[in-house]
């Protein structure tokens, strides 16, 4: 029974992470402990342990006397995200190239295979989750106790934002997704070769691609039209 209880707790933890990353649970929304603990067939104390673990990793916010909420995405968090992302990704990628093990590289290659399969099949959630996993493995390779928590928190919002731009609605957005997959292959090559400098440069380029993709998503198409042309229409 103890093994089954642990297994249910582990499934609850993994599924709540997946639901948060894929926006099935909206940022800032309340977490109904009673309903969810019943749904996952675990009692309230282990469910609260799961929430505390998720809170420590940045998926959940525990509010005194008000229970738990899914971590918010507001103007400040997004501003901080855009400022911190290139610095953290670059540092982590450089350390990964210096410290990666053969087993970690194999895990990275398998995750990349799954990422490409999700692109081919049109699986939006699969794209976001495998991209998150790809960069999380690079974080594991970096093996830095100071950068790891920052990267984990960064990847949560990157995955959630990614649920929008992993649904390409234009030829240019689809092309950028193809480039992102190719850059993943380059990450693997640079890390496998131990080329820290190249891995760091690529991380910044990869971030710029993500940032451009986000801008394409949030900018109405009409804003790309010169004003004189827009008036003529």
Image: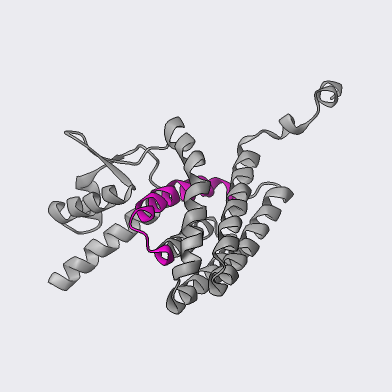
Residue positioned 48% across, 77% down in the render: 106
Q: Nearer the viewer, residue 49 or 95?
A: 95
From this view, report whether residue 127 is shown above or below residue 64.
Answer: below
Tell whether position 162 is magenta.
yes
Q: Name the outermost residue toward the top.
A: 231
Residue positioned 49% across, 70% down in the render: 108
Tell whether position 194 is magenta.
no
For the N terminus, the quadrant is bottom left
For the C terminus, the quadrant is top right
From this view, report whether residue 172 is shown above or below residue 202.
Answer: above
From this view, report whether residue 83 is shown above or below residue 139.
Answer: above
From this view, report whether residue 72 is shown above or below residue 178.
Answer: above
Q: Nearer the viewer, residue 177 or 185?
A: 185
Camera sees residue 122: yes
Q: Relative to residue 55, is residue 43 drawn left or right?
A: left
Camera sees residue 22: no
Residue positioned 57% across, 74% down in the render: 193
Residue 196, image x and y in percent? Answer: 54, 64
Q: Relative to residue 63, is residue 203 drawn left or right?
A: right
Q: Relative to residue 198, is residue 98 drawn left or right?
A: left
Residue positioned 35% across, 41% down in the render: 71
Classified by dominant secondary structure, the portion drawn in magenta counts as: helix
Q: Which residues are magenta?
A: 140-167
Residue 192, image x and y in percent? Answer: 54, 74
């Amino acid at each position: 029974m103890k093994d089954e209880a642990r297994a249910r707790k582990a499934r609850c933890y993994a599924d709540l992470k997946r639901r948060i990353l894929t926006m099935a649970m909206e940022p800032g929304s309340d977490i109904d402990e009673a309903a969810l603990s019943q749904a996952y067939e675990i009692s309230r104390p282990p469910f609260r342990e799961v929430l505390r673990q998720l809170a420590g990793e940045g998926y959940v916010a525990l509010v005194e006397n008000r229970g738990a909420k899914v971590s918010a995405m507001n103007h400040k968090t997004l501003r901080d995200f855009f400022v911190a992302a290139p610095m953290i990704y670059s540092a982590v990628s450089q350390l990964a190239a210096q410290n990666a093990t053969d087993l970690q590289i194999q895990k990275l290659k398998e995750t990349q295979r799954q990422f490409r399969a999700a692109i081919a099949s049109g699986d939006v959630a699969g794209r976001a989750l495998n991209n998150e996993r790809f960069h999380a493995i690079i974080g594991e390779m970096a093996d830095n106790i100071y950068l790891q928590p920052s990267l984990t928190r960064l990847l949560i919002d990157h995955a959630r934002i990614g649920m929008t731009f992993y649904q390409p609605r234009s030829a240019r957005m689809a092309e950028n997704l193809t480039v992102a997959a190719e850059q993943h292959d380059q990450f693997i090559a640079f890390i496998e070769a131990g080329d820290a400098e190249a891995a760091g440069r690529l991380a910044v380029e990869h971030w710029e691609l993500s940032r451009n993709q986000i801008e394409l998503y949030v900018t109405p198409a009409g804003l790309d039209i010169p004003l004189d042309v827009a008036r003529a229409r």
